[in-house]
Amino acid sequence: MFKQLDRHDIEVLTNIVGAEHITVGGDIDHEFTHDELKNVSGKPEAHVYVSDKYQVSKIMAYAYENNLPVTVRGAGTGLVGSCVPVHGGILLNTSKMNHIIELDNVNLTLTVEPGVLLLDIYEAVEKENLFYAPDPGEKTATIGGNISTNAGGMRAIKYGVTRDWVRGLEVVLPNGEIIQTGGKVVKNSTGYGLKDLIIGSEGTLGIIVSATLKLISKPKKTVSLLVPFHNREEAIKAAPVLIKNHVTPTAVEFLEKQSLQYSETFLGKKIPHNNFEAYLLLSYDGNTDASVENDIKIASNMCLELGAIDVFLVDTAERAKSVWTVRGGFLEAIKSSTDEIDEIDVCLPRSAVSAYLAYAREVSEQLHIRIPYFGHIGDGNLHIYFCKDGMSQSDWESIVHKGFKLMYDKAFEMGGVVSGEHGIGYAKKAYMIDLLGDTQIQLMKGIKQVFDPKGILNPSKVI
């Protein structure tokens, strides 16, 4: 389907980026054949670091003319194979495009290259008392990857997902042309929303070479509540009531004793009050002590009325860091507890969460496999993990196939979707097709055809 790279192609790429920025064949590090989860693999024929949008444009124009497949990679922290070059070709690495271009204190925007890390964005804006709200768990992910998957995170319930914080994008199309969609404007009803179409398209429609992000004033005070319950059902049931009848929390996370223990063991750190079966971890922010204190007072009383055993205030920096670090370590902790994992990243209506997690436990018993989970209970996004635990490869593949089919079918039956924030990539395509059906898939294929008629950009991903 695609042309294999030859010596001339390598020479052209080398002339564009310089010999020190290209690796070919057997010299390519194995790290660049997979993403963080390692369940999808593919080896590029050339691994190329780009340093600016003009290099990206030249490479894409040449690749388009010569029918060479191109896959874009940032930090490689994805979980569905989006950045894996399953057709070989060129792996175009944007991680060295890591400059903050402009912080605009008047329009409250930050313009960045795609390789800027999320943690560097926080550092840059918070020094100016500004706030970029999206809070995905992996802070060493690049902003280009966040935008490409429309990453969510723990603050999505109050502040929305990455899409809600992108004002404009500069994008290189598959034929090498550079376009600008959106900008610093707050409103935009000018034609189809191409910016929002590119966000979440996982590098299949164009390559993001700069992004203009929305900022707001940084909340002056943030306080968390760690709320234990007798069981998971009571905790899950309480969450939507809190959201409906009170000020919207910044975050509502569901923790269960098992996942908590995995994380504490992995990190070598313990949170206070860690001996209960289930928890809600709530966060509230605001601009005055009085407003936040009023919020947590009301929330605390409501939690107790809803069956909470107690409400523990996490009001010091040390306690907050301890609790949120343990919560943020869940994925790595579960990975470290077994030899291989695979993940389901469903998003459900909040009303269906309790029944869905009960079903996950049924599937665990039925298939004799360990299935830990945790979730952003405030927005219904659940992370459910199948653990290999030493079983044979054939048994593992069979159980994952059966179990994922059961879990996704149940999610769709309950009004859920395949992914809340990690995307479709290569690994989750079949489940998306089952959910969306032929008409929507054909519409998506039509969009891909308009952007990329030769299908060279991140082939075999999403659709």
Image: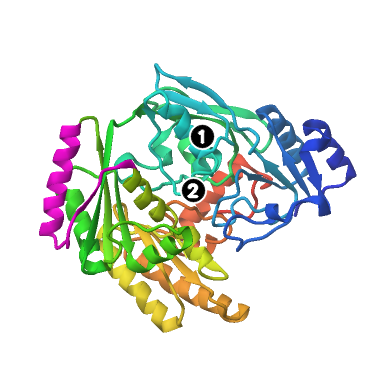
Q: Foreground residue, 5 or 83?
A: 83
Which image quadrant for residue 117? Answer: top right
Q: Residues within 10 Å of mark 1 (few under 14, many from 20)?
A: some
Across and down, in percent, residue 308 comes to 17, 61
Q: Residue at x 50, y 43 (%)?
A: 146
Colour pattern of the rendering: rainbow
- Number of numbered discs: 2
Q: Residue 160: where, in percent of width, then height?
A: 35, 41
Query: The C terminus lies in which quarter of the figure?
Result: bottom right
**Location of residue 284 with respect to 127 vertically, above or below:** below
Real-space Cα distance between discs 2 and 1?
12 Å
Q: Is residue 67 left or right of residue 6?
A: left
Please name the residue shown 61% across and 55% down the image: 35
130 vs 460, left or right, is left
> Which SS type dominates the magenta stretch?
helix
The residue to which callout 2 is attached is: 138
Label drawn at residue 300:
none
Q: Quadrant of the N terminus?
A: bottom right
Q: Is residue 310 magenta?
A: yes
Residue 369 falls inside the magenta stretch? no
Q: Is residue 164 above or below residue 373?
A: above
> Which residues are the magenta region?
289-317
Q: Secondary structure at mark 2?
A: loop
Side (left or right) of 75 relative to 29: left
Residue 127, given in percent of the width and then of the height, sits at: 42, 26
Report the amino acid beneath label 1. Answer: Asp
Residue 72: quadrant of the picture: top right
Assign a secondary structure to mark 1: helix
Inspect this view and state whether residue 192 appears: no
Q: Which disc is residue 120 wearing?
A: 1
